[in-house]
Image: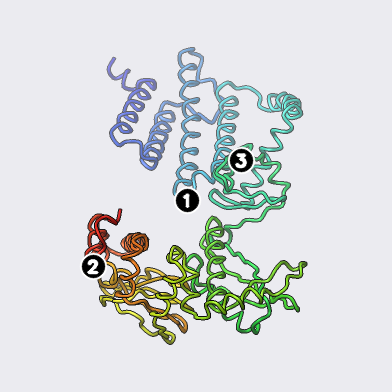
Amino acid sequence: MIQQLLWNPLFQFAVLVLATVTVRVVLGRNPTIRFIVSVCFFALLTVTVLSNGITPYSPDSGGDVLSRRITAGFLKAVWWIGGAVVLVSSVRLFLIFENKPREGRLAQDLVVGVIYLGAGLALIANVFSLPIGTLIATSGAFAIVLGLALQSTLNDVFSGVALNLGRPYAVGDWIILEGGFQGRVVETNWRSTHLVNGTGDLVVLPNSTLAKSRLVNLTRPDETHGASIMVRFLPTRTPAAMEETMRTVLLSSVSIVKTPPPSALVVGIDSQAIEIELSFKVLGFALAGVAKSEIFDLVYRHAKATGLKMAGPRDVAVPYPEAASESQSAKHPGTPWRLLESISLFATLTDDEKDALASSMTRRTYRKNAIIASQGSKLSSLMIMRTGVASVEHTENDVRAELARLAPGDLFGERGVLVDAVEAGDTRALTFVVIYEISKEDLAAVMRDRPALAEELGVLLARRMEDEEHLTSANSLMHVPHPDTLASRIRRLFEIPRETELT
């Protein structure tokens, strides 16, 4: 009886199933391990079936004994299903190796469906010995009726198959459709493609709509995205001078990529204005808005620093605002006063206070690549950028990192003036630079009367030191002081009374 039991195909199958389940439980649910276990199970099942005289790919009856026929039919069915599972596991494992399981979801489902359909037809022919031709003919008529009823759905399905094979976009790509709609692809399936638009809303589009639409993929062939802005200036300077100023604007930006280099080109000129187009690239489509905002701000600051005046719209004639400029210049002709006027930090000062502070300011010039302040040095004056671009670069363990770019209107040196600390990096001129400096003593005289100015400078210092700490490794130069400690040091250095204590 034991020998008969051991040679019983159902007993052998039960042992094989038990061993397979045990191995899967012990080795876990790793897809690669599961695939290897499935292949081993199918191989051992094939040996078991063939050794008992059962041919799974032949429509034999399995003998005249009913129990033998039932056993043979059961093992054939398991063999065909097991073969289908092995093929399906190989398909899924291939897509995991490709590291794109979500992008290949539709193609994966299509291949898996074909495998299971083939296994089902083979099972019907070899296990139940039914004529497949008659079955296919009967199901064909039913498929025609069903196809007419589900015409719209099938249109979406086959459009999804075509889109997946053509791959005009993938998950994570930004696309623009006809009509200006744009969004980022987050999922594709049989019927639709899911997009997230600029406001974070989920948009579901049928695949048939996408297949018929003209779309622009903003992510291909690489992640960088090109953008451009147009600026118009009154023709008060030569086009070459304006073009050079706009190149300086692009050099000041930290939001755009440097390779390929951005460009500034004169694209139009008439009696009313000179038009310059600024073209640049960013790392991704989502950063284009941030970069444009930064460049608009820099255009304004550099134009104001170099005396360029913005022109009106192309079809509107706007007279030159010379009268107002001349009256303002006659009242306050000095550049230091106009520089203070353009910086919001000094907006609370009266005209007399601005006059006094402007008269004490000192003008400094630096040629290109000159070091304005060295890392580890201690500045005793507040430095204000008048024109040009400068870079703050921190060096540690022979590794150089850019902390900031300074444009007209930016301040630096406040850490030495406010808390008697050293500079975090080398401040180097990237172009010819003009700087006005305010000595610590002159600034202290103003801050004693205007404690709010000390507060704003303290906030500027804390924010800058926090940004620098994120960009470099923490050390004594980068450590952000506690707000109470920072406030007390500023009070002590500038002898600000305690009733005007900083918060």
User: In the picture provided, is 297 more to the left or to the right than 367?
Assistant: right
Name the one closer to the observer, 183 or 256: 256
Q: Position of residue 168 (x, y in %)?
A: 63, 53
Q: Is mark 3 on a helix, strand or loop?
A: strand
Query: How busy is the neighbourhood of tag 2: few (under 14 within 10 Å), some, or many (20 plus)?
Result: some
Looking at the image, which is closer to me, 3 or 118?
118
Q: Residue 270, position in %: x, y?
A: 75, 78
Q: Distance between the residues labelled 3 and 2?
A: 58 Å
Which residue is at the front of the view, 443 or 478?
443
Residue at point 56%, 38% (across, down): 109
> Mark 1 against mark 2, which lies toward the viewer?
2
- Look at the numbered disc 1 and give the secondary structure of its residue: loop
- Counting the numbered discs, the total is 3
Which residue is drawn at the image coordinates 62% and 49% (left, top)?
165
**Which amino acid, mark 1?**
Glu
Q: What residue sits right under mark 3 in the picture?
A: 203
- Disc 1 and disc 2 in contact, CB within 8 angstroms: no
Q: Can residue 388 be seen in this view?
A: no
Which residue was labeled with disc 2? 493
Image depth: mark 3 or mark 1 in front: 3
Which amino acid, mark 2? Leu
Q: Residues within 10 Å of mark 3 (few under 14, many from 20)?
A: some
Amino acid type at circle 3 is Val
Image mark for residue 98: 1
Could you say which quadrant of the image residue 449 lies in? bottom left
Question: Going from the N terminus, do you reach mark 3 or mark 2 first?
Answer: 3
